[in-house]
Image: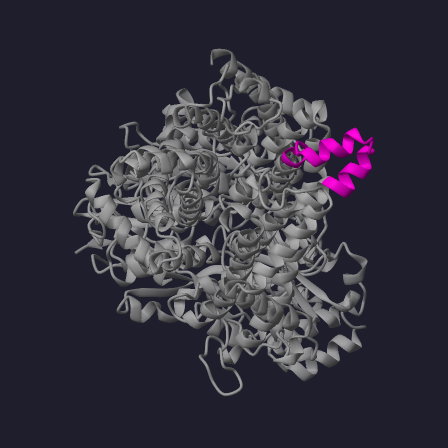
Amino acid sequence: MPEQPPYEEEEFHHGPEGPPPEDLAIAPTGFGGTMDLGSSEAETLEKTPGGPEGTGPKEKPRSLWSDAWRDLRRNPVFIISGLVILFLVVISIWPGLITTQSPLKCDLSKAQQGSQPGHPFGFDGQGCDVYTRTVYGTRISISVGVLATIGVALLGSFLGGLAGFYGGMGDSILSRITDIFFAIPVVLGGLVLLSVVTSNTIWPVVGFMVLLGWPQVSRIARGSVITTKENDYVHAARALGASNSRMLLRHITPNAVAPVIVVATIALGTYISLEATLSYLGVGLKPPTVSWGIDISSASAYIRQAPHMLLWPAGALAITVLAFIMLGDAVRDALDPKLR
Amino acid sequence: MRGATHAKWAACAAAVALAASACGGGGGGSSSGSGTVSASWGDPQNPLEPSNTNEVQGGKVLDMIFRGLKRYNAKTGAAEDMLAKSIETTDSQNFTVTVKDGWKFSNGEAVTAQSFVDAWNYGASLKNNQKNAYFFGYIQGYDKTHPDTGKQTADTLSGLKVTGTNTFTVALTQKFSTFPDTLGYAAFSPLPKSFFSDHAAWVAKPVGNGPYTINSYTKGSQMSLTKWADYPGDDKAKNDGVTLKVYTDNNTAYNDLLAGNLDLVDDVPAAQLKNAKSDLNGRYINTPAGIIQTLAFPFYDPKWNTSGATKVRQGLSMAINRQQITDTIFQKTRTPASDWTSPVLGEKGGFQEGLCGKYCDYNPSEAKKMIQDGGGLPGGQVKISYNADTGSHKEWVDAVCNSINNALGNDKACVGNPIGTFADFRNQIGQHKMPGPFRAGWQMDYPLIQNFLQPLYYTNASSNDGQWSNKQFDNLVNQANAETDTSKAIKLFQQAEGVVRDNMAAIPLWYQNGSAGYSDKVSNVALNQFSVPVYNEITVN
Amino acid sequence: MGRYVIRRLLQMIPVFIGATLLIFVMVNVMGDPIAGLCGERKCDPATAAQLRSEFGLDKPLWQQYLTYLGHIFTGDFGTAFNGQPVTELMATAFPVTIRLTIVAIFFEIIIGITLGVITGLRRGRPVDTGVLLLTLVVISVPTFVTGLLAQLLLGVKWGWIKPSVSTDATFGELIVPGLVLASVSLAYVTRLTRTSIAENKRSDYVRTAVAKGLPRRRVTIRHLLRNSLIPVVTFIGTDIGALMGGAIVTERIFNIHGVGYQLYQGIVRQNTQTVVGFVTILVLIFMVANLLVDLLYAVLDPRIRYA
């Protein structure tokens, strides 16, 4: 990660039209080599003071968000991915809507058999119904993704936002801490931390993702807050004697939150994918939890004999991840005035 | 995946342009020189000292570069004299060993009585941290060289005495009639002087007296062994050498075998077994080995140590459809177990088929009743613990649980409890933290019924992980060990095994076979009873 | 410039200490490694106690860490349980993984940037949409699935490559594993370049250059690409560390005996010395790569100068 302003700021000498240092606060590192793309644009958000929205402190957030919403409603990518996600959420809450069997009911005599009436996706290595397990897996995989994203977004933007707003010593320390977390490869951290876990709930996995994922959001939130802080309307509010907490809540947060949302949406997909990788390495979720990651990793050994076992859960996972990334893309495009 | 393959094509093109080696050339070829065999291997956990190697991977190498006093026949398992000219005793407690003339280490040094005594003293000495030290525990003076606490007060075993160039005597602390038969274990191998004089160099490239010598050893990735032309024994290597390649994932090794990149895989992954025969055109072997898998119980947990718990254990045992699991998951590379030993012992050696009786037969309705009679499952659920990092344990634990769940009509009666690493698994066992039954696999050290019972069920024995304790069993084992007549000793061991059965101290699951696949480049491939390939017999076509 | 570099190097010290401490604590949380050394039986207590004291495991954690740190500064990274010095493991593992990473980065740069430039210049056209969808598919399939499929199809079914990589791990053998390792990052590089090019295409300096009548190719390469590369370079720079550490999965599938393999073994055997040693080096590489990226900015954007 490049060094970030402003503690480095004094060391840059800008030419007359030089970019503000925030331009360098781009491209965060990925979560395990998988990073979001949007941030480069997202971070440069709103730094063009002459933009269409940059007219006044009160109107600006509203017009940005309503503009974005108007864009999104007309964007087919957003509509399709939105519908897919809606469908996934519905069946993860009520899996019974489209399946009648139990994912834990398995009959070894049917192991590895292919598609047959009543069992469209066939059976896995234990003789469990692949269709039912794929449907039930939605709940866990989506829960892991959503909970991890919420945790990362909250913790990251809280710490990053405070550091960006107050700056100084706390900011320097936080930046060093983020560096430390960035430097440790995620899969490695997962292997070490999760191999001691005995609980078979999803919380350890979610907790681990939050623990190693927050620095990514924290960086973006920090950069975003710093950019927003320098805007004229914030200076104006400060001159009018607004308190710190009021400034943070009323003026900065609404404007700085967009990049975080973009990054979070895209990261959600990568967390779902990461859960599968952790299961493949033997440290992911544990039975009797039903998740795509568990099924994909146990099916990966049967890839030659019974590819259908791998195909369905992996396909479901890919579609879900795809839907979230596309949604994130669409949201980013809508929120980025530069690309209009 | 359309996208990915496209990208790969592009990449290949780019790479060729880069003048790196051509893309997709591949296939065959790499398996070194003409007469050598390439075989799959795992990274040995400990340095390759004989008394420090306690797992199969290191054992494979020792089996190639060392020959001990005895050697177990690869087919029958009988302990036959190798370097021993004779091992004589009158009282089953004091033995006189005579070593054959003419044996040498591959560095030219002669193998003498001293080579054995030095090696055994080294292994028994606490300061050397040898993990197999307990093998010398019956020899007099072990309590001095290897006290349970504190510093050792002697460096050599008082029970070992060199009485001539080729003879030495062994005095044991108690009668142990089958002691000579244990001497085929690798820990009892002789060691050359260079082992002691330049230990670091020896460990980097071990020197022994077996049919192979180590040519090069890159720790963690590969070992190349060549035939020792001047090997004095009868079991000379029939190939020019063996290259052992370390694999992290046995699926990769199997893929390499299919692609002609490897000659021998001795651990065919469970998922591939179904097609192994057709994949390999019959170049696939499946032979019994001295390994039994059981489910042990945490007897230190009061919930599992009630009077009703015996019935619950028996009920659980009856809820497991062994036949179906061994057929489906293991594709007949396991045989449903009906006693607590192994078929490789043979009837004469103490194996008793059907000893377990109806408690090892699948009977879901009876199982349900037994468990109810016994007070139900402790806590309403059993968690079967296993380590997730090695072996294909997840598959069978899940299958066992499904079998139990189906029998009891409850989806959550049994769940697997994977533990990330083997080390942590052993740790939790050691700290008595098992929440329920746990995987217990036992691979024999030597083919004796004693080895299947005493280490596992004797009070406080080294592998009695469930802390089962039964006076009657202990007494019978003591009597059996003191018995000089072998067949009488075996009878007593069998009586002790009956005690294990009556209490269902552990649920026997299945006897494990060794399975291996090999390429068309080699023939005469066989596994011995320890499921280790008999490398020196392999011929290269 | 010199002062800047020195300052950056000094800032690395707390990060370095923090990262090693963090991983040290994490590995120690895993518990006592000795129990796993004795196979399916209890280690005899005397040997276990002695091993513990030999590896320093009987000391309090902070003391273990300080001792370890002290040794590192003298170049001693400890000994693995199989009796091999960790530095020796590093000497065999790092060259392999560095080669793998070079292959991966090479693909990221060549394929990723090329595709990014093409799509960025043709935003909204079918080529753009096609590549965009492709990158999404690559991102949404977990790497281990891509790797297993590549191994099965290319290695076993079609026989184009060997399913595993030999001990030598030459560049030629590492092409497919490198591509698998790079796949997700490659997709990101493509998208990052695309956005960056699309944004800069409309900037004043590009318009000026075009108005001046410079040839298109020259405008694209000299002006547009050079300025658009900053976010891409940042990404690739930070990706070096992630690639080397994230190679655990790829190295396992293709049986490559590199850093990922050693780390995996180290973790499975709870070998603190191996794991902490390797991670320490990875952390260093990560930090140095970041510093280099920042210095590269000055090259790419003449407006940036470090004092």
Residue at the far bottom: name it.
A117
Where does the image place residue C247, in percent across and percent down from the top left? 44, 43
Counting every numbered tag in the picture gives: 0
Quadrant placement of the N terminus of chain B: bottom left
Is most of the magenta stretch helix, strand or loop? helix
Does residue A242 belong to the magenta stretch? yes
Where does the image place residue C106, in percent across and percent down from the top left? 33, 39
In the image, residue C59 sits, relative to residue A147, either above or below, namely above
Q: How is the image coloured?
A: one colour
Residue at the far top: name it.
C3
Where does the image place residue B215, in percent across and percent down from the top left? 27, 34
Left or right of B103, for residue C183:
right
In the image, residue B259 sits, relative to residue A311, either above or below, namely above
Of B369 and C155, nearer the camera is: C155
Of B501 and B448, nearer the camera is: B501
Does residue A139 belong to the magenta stretch? no
Residue B378 in sight from this viewpoint: yes
In the image, residue B447 sits, relative to residue B156, either above or below, namely below
Per the rendered image, the range of residues in magenta is A226-251
Quadrant placement of the C terminus of chain B: bottom left
Of C220 and A200, nearer the camera is: C220
Residue C40 in sight from this viewpoint: no
Where does the image place residue A99, in percent across and percent down from the top left? 61, 80
Of B31 and C44, nearer the camera is: B31
